[in-house]
Image (cartoon, rainbow, N blue to C red):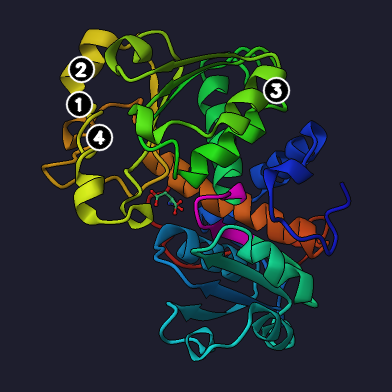
Amino acid sequence: MNFTGSNILSIKQFERNDIDKIFAVADTMKPYAQRKRATRVLDGAILGNMFFEASTRTRVSFGSAFNLLGGAVRETTGFESSALSKGESLYDTARVLSGYSDVICMRHPEAGSVSEFAKASRVPVINGGDGANEHPTQALLDLYTIRNELQSKGREVDGLRIAMIGDLKHGRTVHSLSQLLCLYNNIHVSLVSPKELAMPEYLIESLREAGHEVTISEELTTHISHVDIAYSTRIQEERFQSKEEADLYRGRFRLNQSIYTQYCEPNTVIMHPLPRDSRAEANELDSDLDQNPNLAIFRQADNGVLVRMALFALVLDVAHLVEKSAYDVPWFPGHRD
Ligand code: NCD
């Protein structure tokens, strides 16, 4: 695809060579994300960061990624503090905000809303999550993480064995990741969820049509025993009718160090898009896994900055110019290696 000026709305818009391109640019962003180098390539550009649903890392990492390229960030958070709560249409909001920004990232609770917004926007729009539908940049950073974790073990994405665990019905990250895996070969996917929270049928069909082997189960331990990646997810409480209904499923698929040691192959990588629900009744990934070197959740979150920098650089067509305005930073860079 031609990235320049394009919206990033869905994984469906990518081919495999597009992913290679994003990852190649993301690799070059490491010195900037690690604060060893700084660049002013987006000096003067403005990101409109519009988050109409709860977010911490997606919103902040989009903003940091844009700042790290030298651009400025303007934010709206929450429905109540925006004119959408006064009955303004997405069309009007998009027409107005695209006059104030060079690119817009948006999260919204309704499936399809970000695409609708993009139709009226005069600048590129990046989907930061639209309801239970898609979260394409999360899938990209997830696959970037999978690629890196496997690479360090001498493996590649083709032939991957992955278990996706938890609320696969409402989890937009696993929806986008499943679509992304369809671009690769010979993947074994175990879908572990309560029956009521199963992966939507159309995504299972897409995986099978791509030639992948898909198993479906309500049982965790046997299905994490032969995988390279165990990808855990949160019960998406905000998509249920009530908290009580969500509570029925909370804590079903807890993973801790003793289960890991007993059932997982050595070096099985643990991922989670975060936030993990660490309340006692849920405890999706126990904190006793924090010392496990195969817990990749924080590397995964760090990779979000690299992938989002790459997307901005490609969409605004400056990837080839980043290094031209770059310099070494004088300040203490923290410990990010
Ligand atoms: C995810 C989301 O918002 O879909 N979080 C994120 O963006 N990293 C997953 C979740 O909230 O459970």
Q: Which residue is mark 1?
A: 256
Amino acid carrying label 2: it is Ile
Q: Verify CB contact (< 8 Å) between mark 1 and mark 2.
A: yes
Q: Earlier in the sequence, mark 2 or mark 3?
A: 3
Q: Secondary structure at mark 1?
A: loop
Q: Is residue 299 above or below residue 218?
A: below
Q: Which mark is residue 285?
A: 4
Give me the C-alpha separation between circle 1 and circle 3.
30 Å
State the residue in front, 45 or 79: 79
- Left or right, 171 with respect to 151, comes to left
Count neighbours of disc 4 (C-alpha within 10 A) and say few if under 14, some if 14 to 19, many if 20 or more.
many
User: x, y (%) of residue 163?
Assistant: 44, 21
Magenta highlight on residue 157: no
- Left or right, 124 with respect to 26, comes to right
Q: Residue at x 38, y 15 (%)?
A: 267
Q: Earlier in the sequence, mark 4 or mark 3?
A: 3
State the residue in front, 77 or 22: 77
Q: Verify CB contact (< 8 Å) between mark 2 and mark 3.
A: no
Give me the C-alpha separation between circle 4 and circle 2.
11 Å
Give me the C-alpha separation between circle 1 and circle 4.
6 Å
Q: Is residue 118 above or below residue 226?
A: below
Q: Is mark 2 within 8 Å of ligand 1?
A: no
Query: Can residue 327 be seen at all in this image of the molecule?
Result: no
Q: Which residue is mark 2?
A: 259
Amino acid carrying label 3: it is Tyr
Amino acid carrying label 1: it is Asn
